[in-house]
Amino acid sequence: MRKKFSVRRFIFIADRGLFSAKNLDHIRNNHGEFIVGLKIGVLQKELQQTFYDISRFEFISEELAIWETQYGEDRCIVTWSKSRAERDRKTRDDIWLKSGRN
């Protein structure tokens, strides 16, 4: 596509399904760039705890906060939203109740 359409710069935008070291390395090795979603749960536990530290975030509003950092060699923008946090808490509570632990 680069040659056919004389494209100098590719930026791949994808959901978290593209996120694998192999896929992202392929894009990097071919001089591509990417914006890709990532679930914190796929990260090592130690790194997850860093992302869960809400004191690192800048609140844009009561509903949304962001934190810009690095993940390996990549720029990483982590977001927190009140609605997602409430939904995740409800899911955890439902699992807890279904397990019979009160």
Image (cartoon, rainbow, N blue to C red):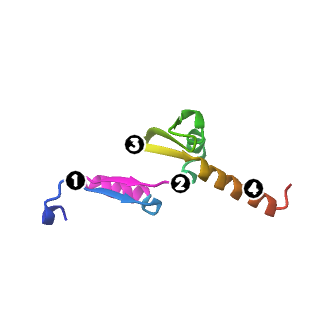
Residue at the image point whose x is 53% and y is 54% from the top: 39
Q: Amino acid at mark 2?
A: Lys
Q: CA distance from mark 3 to mark 4?
A: 33 Å
Residue at the image point whose x is 45% and y is 55% from the top: 37
Q: CA distance from mark 3 to mark 1?
A: 18 Å
26 displayed left or right of 39: left
Residue at the image point whose x is 55% and y is 45% from the top: 80
The percent coordinates of residue 53 (x first, y second) are: 60, 37
91 displayed left or right of 34: right
Question: Residue 28 magenta-drawn?
Answer: yes
Q: Earlier in the sequence, mark 3 or mark 4?
A: 3
What residue is disc 1 on?
Answer: 9
Q: Secondary structure at mark 4?
A: helix
Of the numbered discs in the image, which one, if any, rests on residue 93? 4
Question: Residue 102 magenta-drawn?
Answer: no
94 displayed left or right of 48: right
- State which region is magenta: 20-39
Camera-side residue: 86 or 49? 86
Q: CA distance from mark 3 to mark 2?
A: 15 Å
What residue is disc 2 on?
Answer: 39
The percent coordinates of residue 44 (x first, y second) are: 56, 47
What residue is disc 3 on?
Answer: 75
Q: Is residue 59 above or below residue 11?
A: above
Of the numbered discs in the image, which one, if any, rests on residue 44? none
